[in-house]
Image (cartoon, helix red, strand yellow):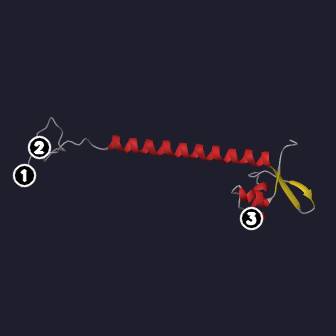
Amino acid sequence: MSDDKLLDSKDLKALGITWSRQHRSNMIAQGLFPAGLHVGPNTVRWLQSDIDIWLAEKKAERSCKWSEARAARLEAEKAAVEAEPANEPRAIGADAPPDEPHQAPTS
């Protein structure tokens, strides 16, 4: 842990975490972002390792969600293809059962 770098808000922004201080505080309060270390009365720093772990979890979450969405999309496409009728030409009266001849309407 002695090699762990301390990150400030600017470092977080450089990593793509561009939230406001208030939003970051809300995320921490909800347990959705690592809590920082209070190194002074108005100074908070985050351990590089905590942020690296959090980013890796977010990446894995995204990958999992993307994979699930892709699987669902492929399943829906497969179901749509299976639900399509065969591409056979249909004759007039083709809706009649095959063992009963089509009868013309009587008027």
Which residue position holds label 1? 106
Identify the image quadrant of the C terminus: bottom left
Measure the C-alpha gap from mark 2 to mark 3.
73 Å
Looking at the picture, tell me which residue is in the foreground, 88 or 49: 49
Badge 3 marks a residue whose secondary structure is: loop
Measure the C-alpha gap from mark 3 to mark 1.
78 Å
**Amino acid found under the numbered disc labelled 1:** Thr
Q: Quadrant of residue 99?
A: top left
Looking at the picture, tell me which residue is in the foreground, 21 or 32: 21
Q: Residues within 10 Å of mark 1 (few under 14, many from 20)?
A: few
Residue pictured at 79% horizontal, 60% vertical: 9
Locate residue 53, reporting x and y percent. Answer: 74, 44
Locate residue 48, reporting x and y percent. Answer: 79, 48
From the viewer's perspective, is the residue at label 2 or at label 3 nearer? 3
From the viewer's perspective, is the residue at label 3 or at label 1 nearer? 3
Which residue position holds label 2? 102
**Amino acid found under the numbered disc labelled 3:** Ser
Looking at the picture, tell me which residue is in the foreground, 69 or 41: 41
45 left or right of 40? left
Badge 2 marks a residue whose secondary structure is: loop
Q: Quadrant of residue 98?
A: top left
Q: Earlier in the sequence, mark 2 or mark 3?
A: 3
Q: Earlier in the sequence, mark 3 or mark 1?
A: 3
Residue pictured at 37% horizontal, 45% vertical: 80
Which residue position holds label 3? 20
Q: How many marks?
A: 3
**Amino acid found under the numbered disc labelled 2:** His
Badge 1 marks a residue whose secondary structure is: loop
Measure the C-alpha gap from mark 2 to mark 1.
12 Å
